[in-house]
Image (spheres, rainbow, N blue to C red):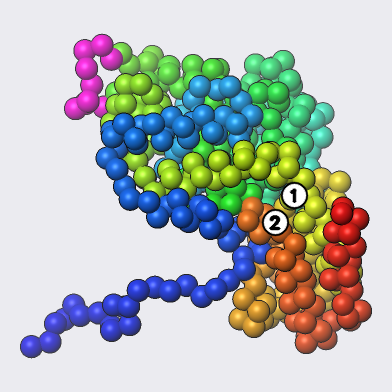
Amino acid sequence: MSDPFAVAEHLLQPFSPPPRLLMGPGPITVDPRVLRAMSAQLVGQYDPAMTECMNDTMALYRGVFQTNNQWTLLVDGTSRAGIEAVLVSLLEPGEKVLVPIFGRFGHLLCEIAERCGAEVHRIETEWGQVFSPEQIEQAIKQVQPKVLAVVQGDTSTTMLQPLEELGAICQRHGVLLYSDATASIGGNPFKTDEWQLDAVSVGLQKCLCGPSGSAPVTLSEQAVAVINKRKHIEAGIRASHHVDGSGQRIRSNYFDLGMIMDYWGEERLNHHTEATTMLYGARECARILLAEGIDNAIARHQLHGNAMAAGVAALNLKLFGDQRHKMTNVVGVYIPPGIEGEAVRHSMLHDFGVEIGTSFGPLHGKIWRIGTMGYNARKDAVMQTLVALEAVLLKHGHGLSAGAGAAAALEVYQGES
């Protein structure tokens, strides 16, 4: 008698991913050192070795974020989990949040804040541009929000929003400043304390050279005070000394940063079973960055980003957006007239094993996004991508000077030697 639930024979074979060089806007090719760290065996979540690893990870990410914040920890989940944890923990229903939108991920902040029940106010600019501090301050004066939520680097447009002046503006107006820096941290300057940020969340899959699945977060004393006013201890682990806060209970159990802080803090109140393998990987991402030195990592991303931008420009391609505010680690390139963008991406992937990105919304089908970030911010990856792109463009009839892209990139490298 046949088994009605039998699966196809090929499903019983292990998955073996094809070799790829991920040169899109993320995720990127993971640093082999991170993969090795993630292959270590698990230990129990309250094993002294485990809690020591958690404490070490907090200390390492203080270095990554450039902060002295005590509450610097991981949210288990992708970078979007970090965003949601911050917003649902800071914003009570009906409270105002202001979001400057200059790409897809500003819209994401609005989407999440709306689901938190917040009153969301937007200001928007053309994709490929960023906001001036004056524009943002004027909107703060009009809206008077509790939180200003802003993306630093938006890979959908490749633009980097300046943050340096926003902290002082928010301080003047009594506003909490939150930034998602997933796409930018580690490859572009980011100074949590100096820029007076109250909350930051990131992911590993861009300049931090890791896989998606862990969201480092840091919180200022002001942000922690807001969260603690909404504090709630679950039945079953609650003890007589626990006291709930006076504010509304945070509307997510999993993303309740008050409970997550209790889990990472000295009391070690059980909240969830830590994603141990991701913890190992996140720790190694931070260790690699700090061992290299943040300034050195930023300079490396700038060098390889400049080489890639020079190379694609030499292939008779036009760069997208305000280049004064471009991220170091990803470049936007207009798809030439008469060229089928997806056909080029298909050939790059299947003929050369190189992935480059498309884009979203008003830029869908108009630009490619080519990343040089994390483990792939290196010379051989840049040169391999440019040579492959030149061959595919020639095949599709795009006019260019043979060898010009690689030559332009080499000029950048020789200028740095």
From this viewpoint, which residue is outermost toward the top?
241
**Type of amino acid under label 1:** Arg
Looking at the picture, how far across and down is residue 29, in whole percent?
58, 61
> Residue 165: which quarter of the image?
top right
Classify the position of the N terminus by image quarter. Answer: bottom left
- Image mark for residue 377: 2
* Magenta stretch in the rendered image: 234-242
Tell me, yes or no, if residue 241 can be seen here. yes
Looking at the picture, how far across and down is residue 102, in whole percent?
72, 46
Query: Does the magenta run of residues contain 239?
Result: yes
Q: On the rendered structure, is 172 left or right of 88?
A: right
Q: Which residue is mark 1?
A: 300
> Residue 370: which quarter of the image?
bottom right
Query: Does the magenta run of residues contain 69?
Result: no
**Type of amino acid under label 2:** Ala
Q: Residue at x 63, y 56 (%)?
A: 375
Disc 1 on helix, strand or loop?
helix
The overriding secondary structure of the stretch rendered in magenta is loop
From this viewpoint, which residue is outermost toward the left?
1
Residue 40 versus residue 13: which sits nearer the camera? Answer: 40
Pointer 1 with pointer 2, Cβ within 8 A: yes
Disc 2 on helix, strand or loop?
loop
Residue 323 versus residue 381: which sits nearer the camera? Answer: 381
Q: Residue at x 44, y 39 (%)?
A: 75
Count of marks placed on residues: 2
Looking at the picture, how far across and down is residue 356, in whole percent?
67, 68
Q: Is residue 278 above or below residue 65?
A: below
Looking at the picture, how far across and down is residue 18, in whole percent?
51, 75
